[in-house]
Amino acid sequence: MNNFTRNIELFLFLIMLTITHSSSDVITITKVSNVTKPGCQSQCGNVTIPYPFGIGPSCFLSKWFEVTCNTSFNPPIPQIGTLRVLEFTDYTFRVANKVASQCYDPFGNITEDNPVYSSLGWTSPFSFSQKNQFTLIGCDDFAFFLGPLQANFTSGCIALCSKPEEVLNGSCSGVGCCQTSIPKALKYYYTSVGSMVHNHTTIWSFDPCTYSFLGEQERFTFGGVSDFMDPGFVNRTRASVPMLVDWVVGNLSCSEARTAGVLACQANSECVDSDTGVPGYRCICHNGYQGQPYLEPGCQDINECEDPSNNLCDGVCTNTPGSYTCGCEDGYVGDGLKTGRGCAKKNSEFPVIKFSLGMGLGFLAILIGITWLYFIFKKRNLVKLRQNFFKQNGGLLLKQRIMSIMTREGNVDSTKVFTAQELEKATNKYAEDRILGRGGYGIVYKGILTDQRVVAIKKSRVMDETQIELFINEVIILTRVHHRNVVKLLGCCLESEVPLLVYEYVSNGTLFDHIHKKGTMTWLSWENRLRVAAEAAGAISYLHSATSTPIIHRDVKSANILLDDNYTTKIADFGASRLVPLDQTQVTTLVQGTLGYLDPEYFHTSQLTEKSDVYSFGVVLAELLTGKKPLCMECNEEERNLAKYFIRSLKENRLFQILEPRVVSEGTLEQLQQIGELVKRCLNLVSEERPTMKEVATELEGLRKFTQHPWARRHADEENANLLNVENQQTDLYEESINPYSSTSGISFGFSNNCGFVYPSNILR
């Protein structure tokens, strides 16, 4: 495979990436107490080594905290395994960075290609901190950021620019520079970079190299075009932008460690459960104490009275364990506080009390008045802000369209404009535990309205002001879509910075989860697969032809096919959909979709038609029949792309070898051949030769009716008896050839699954 084809495949893969932004509690990074275990080396070069870390035998808590002092450097550098440690902090330590790069000569040839693979050890108490951020530097370039198979995490970045003037110093928002966050508990990652430009000579003059790296967010500032041209960018970044690594103690929670008698926390300290996603805990000193919480005798009391700036006493300060008290000398009265009455002679007690009382009441009255005015102005500003958002998001236009429809049709009961307060209350102020999912278009929350209806509320990430009228048109049309197999859009809210869409709530997950997750396949019989496929095809056909304005979904995939409590199909997620005027058969759009399901003709021409949905639905059918994912980056070359693999197997008369055993056992030979041919026609590379969704739905309904006849079941059992015997023999041979490594084997340098063992360097081949 040549380099250009490889880069195109990588770019396609980035189209379907869902850049998730996880939220986490902010922990201030402070210098650790410089306490080393007695008798142990406390310094390596310029770095202090605090316990539980240590240099030498018996100087560290466990093997993971052993530090070696590499004296081949000047000054010496401490290392944990192969990690070069730059500094230790309370909950983290900083390590030297690694930068992936790819460089070109003036003729567009690759002169340097350096991917990066970094590992902390699968069973270690370490993980890459979420205070790190993945960064890509380049023009018309992209980068992968792959986590381990066990973490099921894949992300990446695309940086676009056509000329140097477009790149702004300090701005890392996709033009010349792109950044994205990482998940919790990340112990491994692999990153590589590439170019989306076939002829790199057009931008070589200002973009000779592309770089990607993981580093501490607060330590990196984008320098604009100068970063592209800087030959020392890699060394400078390694020196100035370290990576933060979170650490915890043990692999038990506080209560588990306390029960087992292995809690490492010493006196005057408390145990805090890990919030990094890695099992374990940390020890911190109680308030009013300082020192080393992991070593005897534990944390020591702080004598606040020795430092006047550390106490509020105006009189006599008395130190107590973990705190202090204030009082007055003999002959004086008061509370002894700088912020209180202080200390005064006994004969002046009453005048002081009166004066203090008057001042206190006056100050209280002023404070109440200022607070009252503040809340009034805040409420007015909030109302004004919501009104501005309502106008900005097309609220007036939406009202005008609703009134027009009411005049013409008499009612618009299906369209509701929600207030921001309604949706805040429904989602408990968008609480974390109400999040149903995150995607490229926004976050979906579970909401409970005042009438106890459960809904799904989609909060978009961005809103293009030039597309307001189109957005309002889509809201009006989608709220008037009535089909039992299409998720109903109930209304919207325009009083927030970005519009909020309110959908009916579908409770039983996605078809993708039911196909690919273990333990959820019991209901997925051949008859139910046909029913789900027929219902989904009928719903998409309805969108194409039965609505007043045809709707092309543009992102048909099993993850967008929801199932309710009765396993009834619901087509969802119209974030990428496009309305097509009745006098047009295709529209030109920016290519959007999910790799593996994306219509190749649409990708190459940007011409979106109803047949693009047909291709994507064909991939869903193949997924239903085989139980395989549309893309398997860990599989061998033949099985990596499900659509190609299915067509090739059909041509080579190997269809029954790739189908799920349950499908083969429950479906008749005629049915399986017929649906296999249907998938083949849907996956035709020429869109004009694909069937319409109406034809697909009709054919699937015909297969369903055939399945429901009692004689069809008996015929299937007899017909498949011999076929299953053959399949069982092939399965035995296949199971003997499966790689014995599983996805949880803990091998730190690669990934494994039922497709065989794949090293990270093979992922991009």
Image: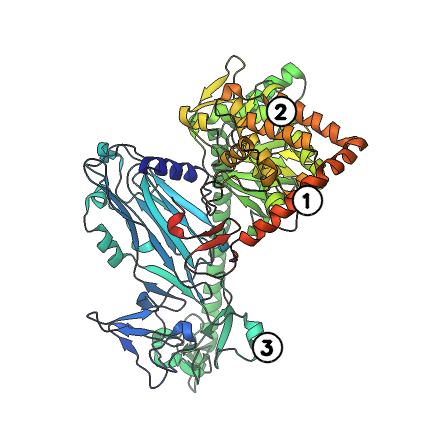
- Tag in front: 1 or 3: 1
Q: Foreground: 352 or 631?
A: 631
Q: Is residue 145 left or right of residue 572?
A: left
Residue 756 seen in this snapshot: yes
Question: Looking at numbered disc 2 in the image, what kind of residue is underneath it?
Answer: Val
- Whole-Å distance between the Cαs marked 1 and 2? 32 Å
Q: Quadrant of residue 652?
A: top right
- Whole-Å distance between the Cαs marked 1 and 3? 54 Å
Establish if 686 lies above or below 109: above
Establish if 112 lies above or below 291: above
Question: Looking at numbered disc 3 in the image, what kind of residue is underneath it?
Answer: Thr
Q: Foreground: 471 or 235?
A: 235
Check disc 1 and report the residue beneath it: 725
Where's the N terminus, which quadrant? Answer: top left
Residue 485 seen in this snapshot: no
Q: Sequence order check: which comes first, mark 1 or mark 2?
A: 2
Question: Which residue is outermost to the top?
Answer: 583
Question: Callout 2: few (<14), some (14-19), or many (20+) C-alpha neighbours within 10 Å?
Answer: many
Establish if 214 lies above or below 143: below
Check disc 3 and report the residue beneath it: 259
Check disc 2 and report the residue beneath it: 696
Q: Which mark is residue 577?
A: none
- Tag in front: 1 or 2: 1
Q: Secondary structure at mark 2?
A: helix
Establish if 685 lies above or below 734: above
Q: Sequence order check: which comes first, mark 1 or mark 3?
A: 3
Question: Looking at numbered disc 1 in the image, what kind of residue is underneath it?
Answer: Asn
The reply to whether callout 1 and callout 2 are in contact (CB within 8 Å) is no
Q: Sequence order check: which comes first, mark 2 or mark 3?
A: 3
Where's the C terminus, which quadrant? Answer: top left
